Image: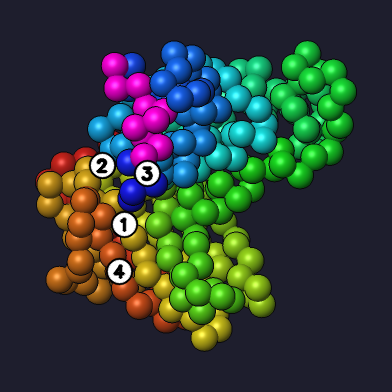
Amino acid sequence: MRILKYLSKLFLNEKEGLISDSISGSNFSFHSNLFALRFGLVPTEYKDTVIDFLISSDAGSVYAYQYYLEALYRNGRQHEAYNLLTSLKKRSWHRMITDLDSDMTTESWSFDINPGMDLSHSWGSSPISIITSNIIGVSSKVPKFKKFNIHPKDKDLNFFNSKVPLIDSFLTLNMKRDQYSINYSLEFSGSRVANFYLDVSPCSNYEISKNNVSIENLFSEGGIVVVPNIPSGKYEINMKCLSNPLQ
């Protein structure tokens, strides 16, 4: 925390609410603000200003977008992150396919931006890890996925089907949403335990069930409810809004 406060004192411009490129500087670049946000160097009260600046900049390299997407998801901006993943703009994975006729991720967004780029570059493949760890929401707490979390950030989707590798087996998670409820079909094997996180913030009153059995007294914080300690097996996890629609 002492380092955070010191860096903020040196680089944060309180008037603009942005991170400067140099000590007490007046230039504010996309990358300076992006990496400060991603690695927790932006004070809470300035995060929205920094995020809005990043979005309005319409800048950043393919390499930087890994950190950009992570920063958005970590700071509650899943809708903006999803828009980047599905964008049709020049800086997009869609344009890699349509403009470059590419079936691999490229080093840069286009030859206009980087005439010397190559056509197969691992750092362009960030949607793979972002979709798995954020939209599907699977993340390991200990080695070999013996304990792991599932926290889907999927508000922009009405359904998905997924299959995630877990070292020695696979986890399947399928989602279907309607006006008042969202249902997850979960299956995994092995000596494993999962915590499942559900966003109940759209609901003023709700019911959560596992395999058609209502679950009571779940831990809730900040609009997130946790279904804890789910052992390997096959489950239907359902959240139903009882008083208002989800959408």
Position in image of residue 131 (x %, y %)? 55, 47
Check contact, mark 4 vs mark 1: CB within 8 A. yes
Q: Which residue is mark 2?
A: 246
Name the residue located 37 percent from the left edge and 44 percent from the top edge.
4
**Does the segment drawn in magenta span residue 13?**
yes
**Does the segment drawn in magenta span residue 92?**
no
Q: Secondary structure at mark 4?
A: strand
Q: Could you tell which of marks 4 and 2 lies nearer the N-terminus?
A: 4
Residue 198, label in figure? 1
Q: Which residue is mark 4?
A: 227
Check contact, mark 2 vs mark 1: CB within 8 A. no
> Quick check: 180 left or right of 58?
left
> Quick check: 3 left or right of 28?
left
- The disc labelled 1 sits on which kind of residue? Leu
Q: Could you tell which of marks 4 and 1 lies nearer the N-terminus?
A: 1
Name the residue located 40 percent from the left edge and 37 percent from the top edge.
7
Magenta region, residue range: 6-15
Q: Secondary structure at mark 3?
A: helix
Q: Nearer the viewer, mark 4 or mark 2?
A: 4
